[in-house]
Amino acid sequence: FQNQSVLVIHIRRHTGERPFSCPDCTKSFKSKYHLLRHQYVHTGEKPFMCINCGLQFRQLPQLVVHERIHTGERPFACDQCPKA
């Protein structure tokens, strides 16, 4: 693991420990990062914006997938036919 704190978070996957609780609902998380990311659901904040069309997203992976609309990138191809 990259460092001690990353190992601690990984170990929580095995122990089920989730010490970071959301103050707005009953969900809890194994890391502060995951809690902060979850809180966007309650605040409505969408910090990731597409520079092409201005559409906003709560999570970076959502933006990355969206940006493929503008680039035409289709990284996943069917191994049964030529469609991607």
Image (tube, grey):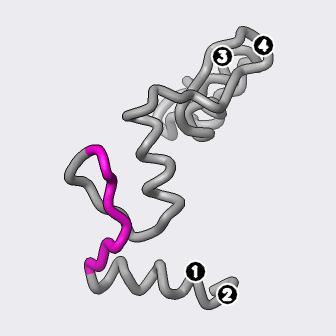
Residue at the spot of label 3: 69
The Cα atoms of the two marked residues, 4 and 2, are separated by 37 Å
Q: Residue at the location (39% across, 34% down)? A: 41
The Cα atoms of the two marked residues, 4 and 3, are separated by 10 Å
Residue at the spot of label 4: 52
- Whether residue 17 appears in magenta in the rendering, the answer is yes
Question: Mark 4, mark 3: which one is toward the viewer?
Answer: 4
Q: Residue at the location (53% across, 60% down)? A: 33
Q: Earlier in the sequence, mark 4 or mark 1?
A: 1
| Residue closest to the far top | 53
For the residue marked with disc 1, what is the amino acid? Val
Q: In which quarter of the image is residue 6?
A: bottom right
Question: Mark 4, mark 1: which one is toward the viewer?
Answer: 1
Residue at the spot of label 2: 3
Are discs 4 and 2 less than 8 Å apart at CB?
no
Mark 4: which secondary structure?
loop
Q: Give the range drawn in magenta.
A: 16-24
Residue at the spot of label 1: 6
The Cα atoms of the two marked residues, 4 and 1, are separated by 34 Å
Going by the image, does 12 lie left or right of 64?
left
Give the total of numbered labels: 4
Going by the image, does 16 lie left or right of 11?
left
Q: In which quarter of the image is residue 39?
A: top left
For the residue marked with disc 2, what is the amino acid? Asn
Residue 49 pos. (x, y %): 69, 24
The Cα atoms of the two marked residues, 2 and 1, are separated by 6 Å
For the residue marked with disc 3, what is the amino acid? Ile
Quarter occupied by the N terminus:
bottom right
For the residue marked with disc 4, what is the amino acid? Asn
Badge 2 crowding class, 10 Å Cα cut-off, few under 14, some 14 to 19, many 20 or more, is few
Mark 1: which secondary structure?
helix
